[in-house]
Image (cartoon, helix red, strand yellow):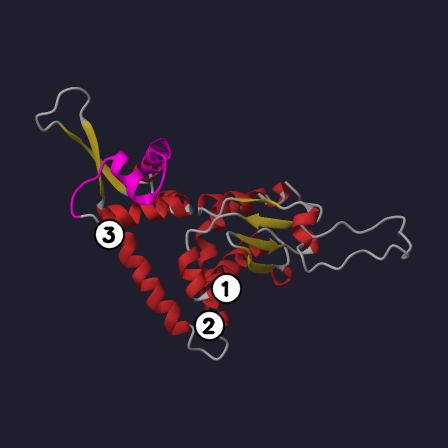
């Protein structure tokens, strides 16, 4: 597994609030814990706790060990936070410090954070080469790998509660232009940071998507990110030049 794939797996694993709670518990625990102890302290069914522990282990964030200390029957499986978790924790601490510093700009850090996101997109330039005819699929693959759990929103969901109701008296045109696609982001590995510094963190993500759009030959300036349209949901509205590029 290369560094980019490893980071993507970690981000995907941490996109779940429950998994972040499990990981935080293991990081704070002075001793290894089994699935039953994790379930009891986090408030999960033990089967659900085991699922989240498996996901965290597969992402390299925790380790398991077998406890055979003088017990009969099936030995206990104990879990501890792995070295990668400490590294990620330090990186998140640093990202919060940097986001706080950028937020002191007059525009709350939007401009510089967007440029940073556009530079981030260069990491995917080789992967995107030759995929312009695949529509939104290359963008969805990148967002999924990073842990955003994306899919295309339905027209009703994309319009949101603030959308104006159609005028029943208005004539219906013979042919209407297709609506710009909207991608629903159901998860975010940076959600806690985004709640603290929305302008900075979300602007980085906007810059990333704009950079990807540019590499795919789409107009980056039409793209809009609407954070927290729901408690766990953000909307990414693409430009009308994506309307013929639905997955």
Of the numbered discs 1 and 3, the one sitting upstream in the chain is 3
Q: Which residue lies most toward the bottom here?
A: 106
Q: Residues within 10 Å of mark 1 (few under 14, many from 20)?
A: many
Residue occupying the point 91% across, 54% down: 171
Q: Which residue is mark 3?
A: 86
Q: Where's residue 104, x and y in %?
A: 42, 77
Compared with 215, 135 (above or below) is above
Label 3 crowd bin: few (<14), some (14–19), many (20+), radius 10 Å? few
Quarter of image, res 77: top left
- Pointers 1 and 2 in contact (C-beta within 8 Å): yes
Q: Position of residue 106 (x, y in %)?
A: 48, 80
User: 204 or 197: nearer the eye?
Assistant: 197
Residue 150 position by quadrant:
top right
Examine the rendering and report whether any part of residue 17 can be seen: yes
The residue labelled by disc 1 is 203
Spot occupied by residue 42 in the image (x, y as percentages of width and height): 32, 44
In the picture of the structure, the residue carrying the numbered disc 2 is: 109
In the rendered structure, the answer to whether residue 109 lies left or right of residue 139 reads left
């Amino acid at each position: 597994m290369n560094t980019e794939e490893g980071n993507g797996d970690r981000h995907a694993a941490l996109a779940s609030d429950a998994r972040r709670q499990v990981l935080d518990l293991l990081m704070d625990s002075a001793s290894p814990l089994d699935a039953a102890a994790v379930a009891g302290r986090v408030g999960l069914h033990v089967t659900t706790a085991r699922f989240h522990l498996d996901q965290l282990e597969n992402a390299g964030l925790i380790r398991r060990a077998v406890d055979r200390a003088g017990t009969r029957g099936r030995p206990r499986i104990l879990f501890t936070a792995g070295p990668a978790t400490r590294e990620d924790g330090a990186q998140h601490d640093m990202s919060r410090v940097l986001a706080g510093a950028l937020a002191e700009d007059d525009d709350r850090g939007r401009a510089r954070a967007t440029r940073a996101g556009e530079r981030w997109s260069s990491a995917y330039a080789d992967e995107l080469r030759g995929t312009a005819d695949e529509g939104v699929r290359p963008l969805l693959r990148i967002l999924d790998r990073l842990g955003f759990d994306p899919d295309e929103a339905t027209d009703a969901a994309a319009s949101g509660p603030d959308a104006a109701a159609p005028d029943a008296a208005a004539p219906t045109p013979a042919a209407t232009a297709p609506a710009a696609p909207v991608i629903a982001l159901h998860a975010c590995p940076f959600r806690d940071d985004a709640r603290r510094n929305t302008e900075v963190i979300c602007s980085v993500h906007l810059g990333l998507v704009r950079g990807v759009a540019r590499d795919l030959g789409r107009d980056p300036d039409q793209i809009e990110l609407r954070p927290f349209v729901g408690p766990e949901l953000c909307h990414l509205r693409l430009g009308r030049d994506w309307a013929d590029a639905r997955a």
